[in-house]
């Protein structure tokens, strides 16, 4: 019963975080919150006894994807500043 309650709780948190990521105006916040959604998904996979899927989701979904998005966001801001100055 406790595991089912945790699964429901993390599922609700995922939906709330995903809706927040969709509706926020700040791109940095949206990227970070989408990483949190992925991290919560990896916790859910772990609770459902799928540790291999949980590790993959944590490494690729939460880790690598968030880093790539943050790098891309930084590059876009840098190029925009260069365009504004020159």
Image (cartoon, helix red, strand yellow):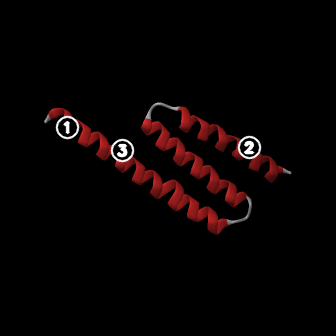
Which type of secondary structure does the marked residue at label 3 adopt? helix
Counting from the top left corner in percent of width and height, residue 50 is at 69, 66
Q: CA distance from mark 3 to mark 2?
A: 31 Å
Say which residue label 2 marks.
9
Q: Nearer the viewer, mark 3 or mark 2?
A: 3
Seen from this angle, which residue lies furthest right? 1
Nearest to the observer: residue 8 or residue 81 = 81
Work out whether mark 1 precedes mark 3 in sequence or the reverse, and give the earlier one: 3
In the image, residue 59 above or below residue 31: below
The residue at which mark 3 appears reads as 73
Residue 25: image x %, image y %? 47, 30
Q: Nearer the viewer, mark 1 or mark 3?
A: 1
Q: 36 above or below 80?
A: below
**Of all residues shown, which one is farthest toward the left?**
86
Classify residue 43 as left or right of residue 3.
Answer: left
Q: Which residue is mark 1?
A: 83
First-in-chain label (3 vs 2): 2
Asked whether the beta carbons under mark 1 and mark 3 sit within 8 Å of each other, the answer is no
Residue at horizontal 19%, vertical 37%?
A: 83
> Is disc 1 surrounded by few (<14), some (14 to 19) or many (20+) residues within 10 Å?
few
Residue drawn 55% across the image and 37% down it: 22
At which x and y percent is residue 6?
A: 76, 48
Quadrant where the C terminus is found in the figure:
top left
- For mark 2, give the secondary structure: helix
Residue that appears at 80% across and 47% down: 5
The answer to whether residue 24 is left or right of residue 2 is left
Disc 2 crowd rating (10 Å Cα; few below 14, some 14-19, many 20+) is few
Between label 2 and label 1, give the one nearer the viewer: 1
**Which numbered disc, 2 or 1, marks the residue that appears first in the sequence?**
2
Q: Residues within 10 Å of mark 3 (few under 14, many from 20)?
A: some
Nearer to the camera, 28 or 22 = 22
Q: Which type of secondary structure does the marked residue at label 1 adopt?
A: helix
């Amino acid at each position: 019963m406790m595991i089912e309650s945790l699964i429901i709780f993390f599922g609700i948190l995922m939906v709330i975080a995903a809706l927040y990521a969709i509706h926020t105006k700040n791109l940095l916040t949206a990227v970070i919150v989408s990483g949190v959604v992925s991290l919560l998904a990896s916790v859910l996979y772990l609770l459902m006894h799928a540790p291999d899927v949980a590790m993959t989701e944590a490494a690729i979904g939460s880790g690598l994807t968030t880093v790539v998005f943050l790098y891309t966001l930084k590059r876009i801001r840098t190029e925009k500043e260069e365009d504004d100055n020159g």
